[in-house]
Every structure is written in structure tokens, then in C-alpha cells.
Amino acid sequence: MRDFTYRRADSIDEAIAGVAAGATPIAGGTELLNWMRLGADQSGAVIDIGDVDALRGISLRGGVVRIGSLATLNEIEGDATVREHAPVLAKACLESASAQIRNSATLGGNLLQKTRCPYFRVEAGNETRLPWACNKRQVGSGCSAATGLNDHASIFGTTDACRCNHPSDPAAALATLDATVHVTGPDGERDIPASEFHLSQAEARDLLSSGQADGLKGAWAIGKAGAEAVLLNRMRGDEIITGYSFSVDAASANSVYLKVRERKSFEYAKVSAAVCLEARDGRIQALRVAMGSIAQRPWRLRAAEAKLAGAVLTSDALTPVLDEEFASARPASSQEYKVRLARNAARRAILLAGGKSHA
């Protein structure tokens, strides 16, 4: 771990000023410090935002749930409002990690966590000692996962520069809730749809090629081969996440989160499915599906959502639509199974939501 400076912020303005000056924000500390020890994060300055009370709290007003970015995963999972109006988010937070980690880990930090690709996670004292090619660690070096260990890699939205996925459980839940991510910087507050907050590698490449990446985190790599590997979301380099919000409806109240992993533990998902469903008389009235761990962002099944509106809620009706949705997947050499796994998880989650529907 390299030396770094540390300071504490007491307000949102102080936090923004610190980040704008180049510091990396830290709150729960369950993510950043590990990456700094591995050499995967080279931050020279850290600003602690954990005491900024304005970033805390969970409330329901006017049919809108608001959650501060410093709300911990345990606070969200145990909140009565979230459990009643968005059980998909409560379950996603519960499934994310052990109780000890959930007590410290914040929702903001969880959404900004880095990939679990083994080539990115390799320990190294500095960027010149990496034993594997990884564009996220050393832009321009290549992507070892393209032909190597890629069991956990993305099957949608990838490029040759990077195949990693995003491991956040709550990110998929927020996407299916049609939530909004609120970010604030020196120029004020911006609202970003949760389903569009993260960028797939292909989306990052398109932003870079169209000249729209200026100011975003990772924009320092503009012009370098493999630059899309480090452009992860739509935040600017001088912004912080201040909170999240989503409107409650019948579908959000009848929502489920299904996580598929190698063993029953707090392992990262092979695939996950977050579903909000409103059904009436055995037919789908409203459906939102977001898949996790199959792309570098939550992957909404929007075509399937539209085609299944009004459909009978049966496996036979779901199967051909989901088959068509996943036909465009781009699995790597050892990932054909993951396409089937994700498709089956989506179908199972929709049927689970249908089984608990009271409509």
C-alpha cells in the first residue's frame, strides 16, 4: 500500500471540495482499503465522509422512498419501509455480504465497488509488476480474461478490451425499481437513472469515440488503447453520490431477488435476477427485470418486459421470450452455461414473483 493523506469531511460541501481536489471518498471502508492494499487503487489522498449526517436516512414521502448514500446494507435490509415497498432491495442487501460487513458497508460504496475479475485482483506493489494483462490496472496491456479464466465474466456489453462484470447485488435491485441515483458536485446535483448509472464496456467505448467522456471518472485514459476498461459509470470526477430515490407501486411491493452462486454463502453471484411484477387474473400487468453479474452494469430485459405485457404468467409463455432476449449474449470460451443459467434465473424469478402476487 502506498502512502496517502487522510482528512475527514463534516458536510457535503467539504466532501465535494475534497473529491474535486483529487481525494477518494471513503465511508464504510470495506472496499477501498482492500484495493489499496492490493495496489489496485493508487489513491494518494482519502477523504472520510462517514460523519456527514446529511447523507444518511431512509424515508417515505409522497409515494417516494429516499435513501441516503451512507445508509448501510443492514440498515436498508432491516428497514420496515423498504421491506414493505421494495422487498427486492431488502433481499439484495441481505444477500450481499456477512452481517459484519453489512454493518459497515454503505449503499454508495457497494454501487462503486470494483470488479471481482481474478486478473484485476492479483496483488501487485505497483502497476509495473502485474503478472497478467489487465486494461483496468494498466491501460493498453490487454485483457487476459478474453482467453483465460473467464467464468465470472460478462456475457453482454463487452469489448475486446475488458470482459469483467459488476458484482453489486443492490445495483440490480435499484435498476428494477426504476430508481434514481443522485450525485452532487461543484456544479450542483444531477439525477442519473440507476439502470444507466454504470456503463458496459461497449457503452464506454461509444462515449469515448463520440467525445462525450470528458470530465467523467476514468476520462484520464482518453486516447489510450483499452480506455473503455476504466470508464465505469456516468459520474464526473468531482462528484459524490448523495442518495437514491424510487417511486413505490404495486410491482415494487411484489418484488423478488434471486441470487445464483456456487455455494450457499456470501459468495458473489454467478448470475442474479431482480424482478418487480404486478399480475392480475394470472396475467402480467407490469414487469421489470434487471439481471446482475452478466454485464458491467445491471442488465434490464426491456424487450422481454414489453413483449410479456398482458401475457399469461406461465413458464411456457416466458420461455420463448427469454430465449429471444438471451440470444444476443456474447459468452466467452467457458461461459455457454452462463447464458442458460441467466435465462433460467430470469424465468424462475418472474414465476416466484407471480407466486407471491396478491393481485
Image (cartoon, rainbow, N blue to C red):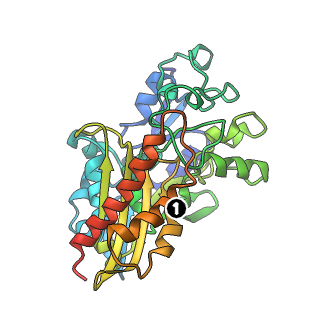
Mark 1 element type: helix
Q: Is residue 159 above or below residue 129?
A: below
Q: How many residues crowd around disc 1 within 10 Å: few (fewer than 14), some, or many (20 or more)?
A: few
Along the viewing direction, whichever of 156 and 292 lies nearer the viewer: 156
Q: Is residue 161 above or below residue 302?
A: above
Q: Is residue 213 visible?
A: no
On the question of residue 313 being in view, the answer is yes
Residue at point 60%, 63% (across, down): 188
Looking at this view, is 359 or 321 the one in front?
321
State the residue at coordinates (74%, 48%): 208
- Left or right of residue 198: residue 268: left
The answer to whether residue 11 is left or right of residue 18 is left
Q: Quadrant of the C terminus?
A: bottom left
Above-or-below relation of 173 to 204? below
Position of 248 with respect to 207 (left or right) is left
Position above or below: 330 against 13: above
**Looking at the picture, how far across and down is residue 334, in whole percent?**
48, 33
Q: Position of residue 214 (x, y in %)?
A: 73, 50
Q: Quadrant of residue 78?
A: bottom left
Residue 111 image point, x, y percent: 44, 49
The amino acid type found where label 1 is placed reads: Glu
Among the 4 quarters of the image, the one containing residue 338: top left
Q: Could you tell me residue 297's position as x and y percent?
A: 51, 51
Q: Residue at x 59, y 51 (%)?
A: 199
Residue occupied by mark 1: 324
